[in-house]
Amino acid sequence: MVTNNATDTRTKLIRIFTFLGGIYFFLYFVLPESAVISLGMKAHHEEISNGFIVIGAMALGLGLYNIIRAHGARVVFQRAGWFNSLALLVGLVAMIGATSAQWLENIRNTKDIRSVQIVGEFATRIVEDVRTPPVGRLVPPFRERVSALIRYGDDRASLVEAHTNLSVEAGTNGGTSILVVEVRERIATARAKLEELKGVSWQQPTEENVGRLTQFSQDVAKLASSYSLMKRSHDAHGLSQRLYDFLFDGLFNQLGSAMFALLGVYIGAAAYRAFRVRTIESGLMMVAAVIVMLGQISFGKEIYENMPSIRQWLLEVPNSAAFRAIRLGAGVAGLMLAIRMWLSIESKSFSSGRK
Amino acid sequence: MVGRRLIYLLMILAVGLPIVFGVSQKPSRLVSAERMYDVVEQVRVQPGEVAMVWFDFGPNTIAENEPQAQVLLEHLFRNRIPVVLLSQYQQAERFLAKIPNDVAKRLEAEMPGQQWRYGEAWVNAGFRPGGAIFIQSMVNAADVSKFLGRDVNGMPIAQYHTFSSIGGVERVKLVGEITGLVGVFDNIIQFFQKNDYRPTIVHGCTSITIPEAYIFLDSGQLKGLLEGIAGAAWYSEVIKEHFPKSENKQLLVTNTALSAAHIVLILLIVLGNIAPLFKRRGLHHG
Amino acid sequence: MSGLEHITPGILVILAIAGILLYRELKRVQGGYHHFIRRIPGVDAVEGAVGRCAELGRPVVFTTALTDIGPVLYACLGVLHAVARKVAQYKLKLIVPQYSPEAMALVEDTVREAYRDVGRSSSFDPDGIKFLSNEQFAFASGYMGLMHREKAGAAFMFGSFAAEALVLAEAGQQVGARQVAASVSPEQVAFFICTCDYTLIGEELFGASAYLSREPVQVATLASQDRLKLIFVGLIVVGVVCATLQSWYPGLASCMPHTLLSADWSSLGW
Amino acid sequence: MDSSSSWALASVLAGGLATLAIFSFLIKENGFYRFFEHLFIGIAAGLGPMLIVRDFLWPTILEPMLGLTVVTYPDGTHPEPYQPLYLLYLIPMAFGCLYYFIYSQRYSWLAKLVIGFTLGASGALAIRGFFSEAIPQIAGSFKPLVVMVEGNISLMESFNNILFVATLLLVLNYFFFTFGKEGSLQGKMAPVGRPLLMVCFGAFFGSTVMARLALLVERVQFIVRDWVSAVGTFVGIG
């Protein structure tokens, strides 16, 4: 049993949170830009906004829970329609599985591709640090950095070679053979550069050496971009991607379109049923509908040449005026309600802390 | 009374027959589509400047939105305007990947030797949740490419040379919003703006939302409009005028099937008004 | 006019007026003032529809479809609360198909409250709050099946609807349910008019819960929004007059109402 | 035939079955439909949360928070250090978890904290949303009732503007609820708004038809072209 006292405290607490939820966006709107900047809201707006999105995103489990509870029970106790519920749960699990698998694979590949890019970025960074020695940041001596670069570069080059051969064997380079050729050329170039780097003494960062590094980083960047294209087209043939595509394109999209297509049929029944000219009002509605329909098809022009322009006029003048009025009215009502929501102005609101 | 199921059947036949026999007619002229063509045609970009096109549609409205997306991209690609593709709508992600590829392939087939490659002609920033909030913070970001971070392949967008230095949102020279959803469209209209910046927005809407779109066209918040599939059909005709090799037969057959269905619908309305009369007379006799 | 990322002085004034109007009406109503509210036929039908279910012993379905958390949903909850009370009194089955998980939490809470208000907390069935899907047409397909399997006697469709509206309404038609719809998205109203027994248009949805409950706060909101609208009407009239005069005196541009509204703080030396 | 084309074939065959299942509802609610209805809901229920995690939570929140975006060069140095501030995201994450108390008898009020917070946020956002949409709308309605073109009056445009403004005001007037006692001008004018609304809705109906039919066309094309030929291929193999 909850005492009224506790209830009141909760009610207060809920109202305070409701107010807090709105205060940021409200201030962001009502304060002049100069103030928003000086308060640092502008600088962190992105992160703060993300924070709000995160809160909502956390609710995603509510729906899942509700569905699994309802249909899970039906399957377990074999209630009427348990078979359909089973189909639902299978669909759910399959989709989660396929999406995760495809996602994880994507993460892995991105990691590989990034690692190749990093070789280039690192080379550039070494050059930058030579040009303008870093402040407040400790870096190993020039020579060690370069040898680290060369070692890592060798390693990544072998990785790219391995993957290229893999995709050739798997025959997944059908449409991308040009790509494979390109990748192989670029590996060759990068390798050659690496060999060249190995043959140089790195005691001192001379202009010539630094130039070599810059050139190397550019070659690696090129390699990385064509490697990523090849890798993606290779993954498109992976099992997880295929399964995902099957569920998404083969079922999800198709079912969605089919449902929508029903409307095309229902609209016939609606038109037949509802456009009885009983009153002037329904008559007006019918005439407007027919004119607009004729105006948007080629056939309309054969009946009357200016049909499209009449349609246009109908939409631009009377229709948009009425529409604007509806939106404006609803908008004003929404505004008042928004203020009430934010300030929890309720005689007996959801914010009552009763349990 | 004509039975409900009979009407259902009638509608399916009306749509089906023209498709089975592949009948195609010239679409009717749409001024709004021509206006939009001119708006897009006038867009000129300096290095680093881009167009940003939102595919905010799912399988439910592809029939209308996909052709629109295709004609708009075709036009931008032909003019070599780099495009940032993204979406506020989860189910759009497949089309973000598919449509630009199709268009690029078609153009490459039409003009051998020329290339439209991912990362150069376009980049796919994928689905971005958060709607209004997301758009607000992008508009305020110092560098759009940094703000968007990674593309759908997990690559930093700034890695692609063409998109490495977009900078502030002012450098987005054209905003295309292709959707049948009123909410996401409102997000663009309401939040894709700054005190000192209002983008050129063009919009591909489904026929449902045409009237609403007109309000924004009228108030100047929209600069161009594609009205449903008819809009796309006429836009493709305008493109064809300038580039005779451009292919659009499929689009025209669809458009014709639609006309046929419209006529049946109008007949149903007439029938709906006549049938009761007969019924009443029947009663008198009985 | 320029974009509206931050408020302008002119708009700040309007916002202030809105706040003052709301406060004033609240005080008046609390002081016992009774506002006249014009009849909204659709809303009168709500009671009848529930009554019919009681006679037929068929369940009541109430959906806010794609409406996400925001003012519109908030308005719908007022109506849901009233409907749920009736349903609880008649001891009927209430089904509320859900689209958005976040909204679902709020809806569940509202229905619970309604049952508690009429002292029937025990007969509240959480399984009545059915999460179908947060994909538009998966939701619609679920709703279609549900209407047929449950043989709903009445269906209330309140909120903002998109293409799925006709699917939902036709499903109700097919099982012969008494249907009342209210949509803030005018695109769909035509279809509701074709398939439902009663249709509330645009803002009537916001009026509905005040009309049903006669709750002071809601009536005050209704009154204040009417007055704010009146101010906008006045603004439009003034704007039109200025614009018309402008045809002869182009110099007037600077004192056009919207130029004043969109004037930035900088123009005040900020 | 290779694996890639057999996957494609499978997905077309499945798609056709799914479409026919949904269309079978036109005859009557039946088991075939019911099965695919549930499958659809299941797939959608699995996809939604996964996309939020994959496209938002992971790249925008978790990756940076876990320091996975921090690059480590082969010599062990980092171009940018780890940003501990990202850990602050743990607060909204934890707070969002309160949603789940809605199912608790005892602590459901905790869920109301986060629901309230969300209500407040969407309320405040809606305030801005209203003004940034409505103000241009209102400004766009300031149309001159008399339009001058090169010094003389354009009748057509003037007429359009007059009609536009009149419609706008009359419909707005229709939506007053607490005025309009019998006899008042507002009360008298209110009914005039209705027929204008009907014209608006008729126009909507007409323009909507296209979208509805467009999808029907797309489906019929899919069945007639893709699916039928896919079945042919399939039978051919079998």
Image: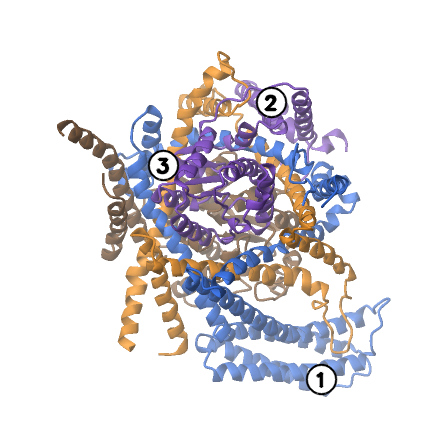
Chain colours: A blue, B brown, C purple, D orange
Secondary structure found at label 1: helix
**Label 1, label 2: how far apart the Cα atoms are:** 76 Å
| Viewer can see residue B237 | no
Which one is in front in this view, the residue at disc 1 or the one at disc 3? 3
In which quadrant will I find the C terminus of chain A?
A: top right
The crowding category of the residue bearing disc 1, from other C-alpha atoms within 10 Å (few below 14, some 14 to 19, many at least 20), is: some
Dot 3 amino acid type? Cys
| Viewer can see residue D32 | yes
Question: Which image quarter: residue C71?
Answer: top right
> Which residue matches tag 3?
C194
> Which residue matches tag 1?
A151
Whether residue B64 sits left or right of residue D122 in the image: it is left
> Which residue matches tag 2?
C227
A192 to D134, vertically: above or below: below
Q: Chain of mark 2?
A: C
Q: Position of residue C15 (x, y in %)?
A: 67, 30
